[in-house]
Amino acid sequence: MAKQTPLYAEHVAAGAKIVDFAGWDMPIHYGSQLDEHKLVRADAGMFDVSHMLPVDIDGAGARDFLRHLVANDVAKLKTPGKALYSCMLKADGGILDDLIIYRFADDDYRIVVNAGTADKDVAWMREVARSLPGGGNVNITPRRDLAIIAVQGPKAQEKVWAALPEAEAAARPLRAFNAARVGDLMVCFTGYTGEVGYELICPAGRVVELWHALLAAGVKPAGLGARDTLRLEAGMALYGQDMNESINPYEAGLAWTVDLSDAARDFIGRAAITAQPAARTLIGLVLEDRGVLRAHMPVFTSHGAGETTSGSFAPSMNASIAFARVPAGVAAGDSVEVEIRDKRLKARVVAAPFVRNGQVLV
Amino acid sequence: MSIPSNLRYTDSHEWVRKEPDNTLSIGITDHAQEALGDIVFLDLPEAGRTVKAGEIVAVIESVKAASDIYAPIAGEIVASNAAAVDAPDSVNNSPYDTWLFKIQPTRLDDIDALLDAAAYAKVADAD
């Protein structure tokens, strides 16, 4: 039996088409994925992402624990509410999950992890803590009692302020990749669309009321279908598709999330991923011939063959785009061929993101 | 869900209309376009191609996925709809006015073996 978020009945009432996503009954769209995509680029839309799991990490050892647990370095988080995107690696460098860590204090962090990996992630975190002296002096608390709504788009912020007047004073001064707590609500200036907006984390019992306040403020729901095309245009990798346990961050276009600046920091996977240069890289593609790129299409380059990992029609570009994993050395500006139904079509290698803040960049 | 009574259908969700010149226009049903979601790309056959019944002749891509379109009847492709290629969303907006390709059937009587509206309604309901 698939799991449902506290907003399930709201999705059904809004006419959602429900699909299984990582064991959850989730809305794929509410009528038109294209319209929802365009609404987020031009105005604002909201996504129920309550299937994702907040995990609170607190205790005297929290900072040192996280510096060991993930490839990016929480030591660079100085101000309360500051967020960090990172991969969590296995000892061999494979990516267990990608996640966002919010720091409120050196003994008080919140991590948000993917739905499909949540149970595995929590088990891993506990195993890592147990391996440390004193159990790492951390408490690891999964928060299934919370729900998350992502409100995204150029008008998202003003509409959230209208829906949540009590949060406006704390939310308005927030800069990108920062969060604030307002009572039992957490307002995060983060997202997965390439637009500005907030991810709102609140008690599950309050989320239906929040959903209705946002509807009343003129925010329309958008489904996971639009979320996928928006994140692909925004050049954001998806766990399970563009990366997995057999891929390291350098092979997933995520070198910028690996912090090697403190040579003494021994994070899990460090030795493996720095032992030798990555043989593969993740690139962006724009299809120049007619067609639609999808995941797992063969890609032919002057450096050898690879494969698309995500692909779609890009509604903001009226073209088709993809991520592809190819041999290292392939670079923006190269021409490659993609095999679609036995035909080889031309594609151009570009530097992601494809789209940011409503503007096409490639 | 609209299923006009003057058309014939396949269990793979194509509709077939007999034109005054005895060619057959083929498109996809309202049920099919709704299941596919927003349609963004059409790959249609070229005129002159000979096709067998049940052969894959076209591909429709929605934002979600690619779907094959089958020739409902054996014959020769005599036209494909360039206007639909330029505006793929017309398949969503008016599925029965947006033909995809036309076939000159080898045997016009083959159309009698296709589903009528009542029979197709059962196929669509069971889908």
Image (cartoon, coloured by chain):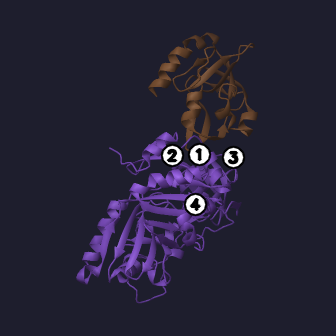
Instruction: Give the Cα distance between marks 3 and 1.
Output: 21 Å
Q: Residue at x 53, y 53 (%)?
A: A213
**Percent of width and height locating residue B22:** 71, 13
Q: Which residue is mark 2?
A: A28
| Chain A on-screen colour | purple
Mark 3–mark 4 Cα distance, whole angstroms, equals 40 Å
* Residue type highlighted by circle 1: Gln
* Residue displayed at 52% across by 15% down: B118
Mark 2 Cα-neighbour bin, 10 Å: few <14, some 14–19, many ≥20: many
Q: Chain of mark 2?
A: A
* Residue that numbered label 4 is attached to: A160
Nearer the observer, disc 3 or disc 4?
A: 4
Chain letter behind tag 1: A
Q: Secondary structure at mark 3?
A: loop
What kind of residue is marked 3?
Arg
Residue, disc 3: A290
Question: Which amino acid lies under the numbered mark 2 shown in the image of this protein?
Answer: Ile
Mark 2 or mark 3, which is nearer the start of the sequence?
2
Instruction: From the image, tell me which residue sits under label 1.
Output: A33
Q: Nearer the viewer, residue A320 or A145?
A: A145
Q: Are marks 2 and 1 on the same chain?
A: yes
Q: In front here: A50 or B95?
A: A50
Across and down, in percent, residue A139 comes to: 30, 74
